[in-house]
Image (cartoon, rainbow, N blue to C red):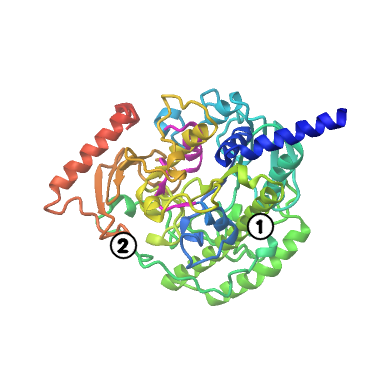
Amino acid sequence: MKNRSQSLLTGGIASILALMPAAYLSAQKRAEKKPMNILYIMSDDHSYQTISAYDKRFIETPNIDRIARDGVRFTNSFVANSISGPSRACMLTGKHSHKNGFKDNDGAFDGSQQTFPKLLQKAGYQTAIVGKWHLHSDPTGFDYWNILPGQGEYYNPVFIDNGEKKNMKGYVTNITTDIALDWLSKERDADKPFCLLLHHKAPHRTWMPDTLDLGRFDATNLPLPDNFFDTYKGRIAAQQQEMSIEKDMNVLYDLKMADKEKEISTVRGYDNVGRDMYQTTGKPGRMDEDQKAAWDRYYDPIIADFKTRQLEGEELTVWKYQRYMRDYLSVIASVDRNVGRVIDYLQENGLWENTLVIYTSDQGFYMGEHGWFDKRFMYEESLRTPLLVHIPSESGKAMVSEDDEKYYMVQNIDYAPTFLELAGVEIPDDIQGKSMLPILKGQKVDDWRNSLYYHYYEYPGAHSVKRHYGVRNDRYKLIHFYNDIDTWELYDLKTDPQEMHNIYDEPGNEELIKTMKDELTKLQELYDVRESDL
């Protein structure tokens, strides 16, 4: 009788379910689904020019490209302050630098302030950060943190595991990924949604490749940018920088030409540091004997050839560019390979379809444009960042059209409110960014920003880039360099995308300048920029 009752009950439920509309069942299934996980992958100094989803001139990055294959590739993604620590502070708080208090790489981030990981924690998320932190204070708002001290080392780095320093064996990009995957597979609470910040050191200076990637791009003759030999006419601040491949890129420190005979020396310093970096010293963060042997097998012939050729002038500058790019791209190859490892894990463990995955960089980087390396300026190569987003979709197709991606100007202050809205958390009024979630869902957003504000503070400082702030809209960019300098620059990005011609002083632009200055003032008022912030 009991079995018959069970059979009737089961059959009755089945009949009822069969009669339910499919849409109702689908909605019920979604309601029972856990909140969406968040995986935020950020590299350090990874240019959009060296991601094949954006630009195929230099390298193929098939794994990074996978993130946007059925998702979103933003082509108008920017930072609020193009320098590592401040950029990270903007991301964590959703606020410009003058509001989160971390304007340059000096000092320490105030970890007591509101951040999106803290708000996600309160909403039931398990939060973690692995890899580069670079905010000079211990992480707060994370259930688990395992970070590199300062800039970190490429080989055999030290990690700080929830306060405990540990010497790790291997290559930093692999180790960072190993730690993240270990947390995902063994440490996290599978009953809670997670937010994992996976921050790679690479490809930060000095671009030291994994031994298995040494020489990967040596057969490639990399194209020089059209403005590689820029003379900076009409751009006073650009004339005074110290980030020139010709003058400031050090052959010992940056390009690994630390010969055993110590015959190579440079004019601009870093000699002792450069020699020490590429030796086995027995200190944490330096190569062991096997790593050094592989390193020497690769670099020793290059050093010998360099000494024999005795390059000078433009020939030396071009050689430095090729070496720089080959090392940089080899480091990117490791990042891409490890991004693939993480995506594979998500897909193989049923997490891909319930995890928002972002790949970006803390700022852009110069690949020889204007003859430069590094970042800092409000010019496009350092202002613009890659931003690739996978957001689960029932259709499994791109959720934003190419036209929409080009239209919406997003900024790294937008990440925090996006994550909060995705998690169903109320966005605090003092957050200055805007949630990108409607854009990611393919919705038309009529009140999206049509201009953005930028401010760089780190002067005096490395590379001697003057303090400046400015406004960019979909066509024009206005920049004011200040402090021990007072000069304005204006660019028409449609006719001059490489920003070679400052038109600020050209007759006939008075009305345009007034319009752009009015927009700049409006943004400064919107973001509560005060006289003391300038």
Report the residue marked by disc 1: 278
Compared to residue 254, the image places residue 302 above or below, namely below
Quadrant where the N terminus lies?
A: top right
Compared to residue 474, the image places residue 430 above or below, namely above
Q: In front: 329, or 27? A: 27
Please give the name of the residue rendered at 66% of the width and 51% of the height, measured from the top-left corner: 173
Residue 507 among magenta residues: no
Residue 82 among magenta residues: yes
Which percent across, then down, holds residue 412? Answer: 45, 41
Give yes or no for contact between labels 1 and 2 (Cβ–Cβ under 8 Å). no
Which percent across, then down, holds residue 47? Answer: 48, 55
In which image quadrant can residue 434 be found?
top left
First in sequence, mark 1 or 2: give its number: 2
Compared to residue 402, the image places residue 263 above or below, namely below
The Cα atoms of the two marked residues, 1 and 2, are separated by 34 Å
Instruction: Please give left or right for residue 81 compared with residue 264 in the image.
Output: left
Q: Amino acid at mark 1?
A: Tyr
- Give the extent of the magenta segment: 72-95
Quadrant where the C terminus lies?
A: top left
Q: Amino acid at mark 2?
A: Thr
Which percent across, then down, holds residue 167? Answer: 75, 43
Report the residue marked by disc 2: 231
Please give the name of the residue rendered at 44% of the width and 57% of the height, measured from the top-left corner: 366
Question: Label 1: few (<14), some or many (≥20) within 10 Å?
Answer: many
| Residue 146 appears in the figure | no
| Residue 78 appears in the figure | yes
Q: In front: 287, or 331? A: 331
In which image quadrant can residue 259 be found?
bottom right
Which type of secondary structure does the marked residue at label 2 adopt?
loop
Please give the name of the residue rendered at 48% of the width and 31% of the height, measured from the top-left corner: 93
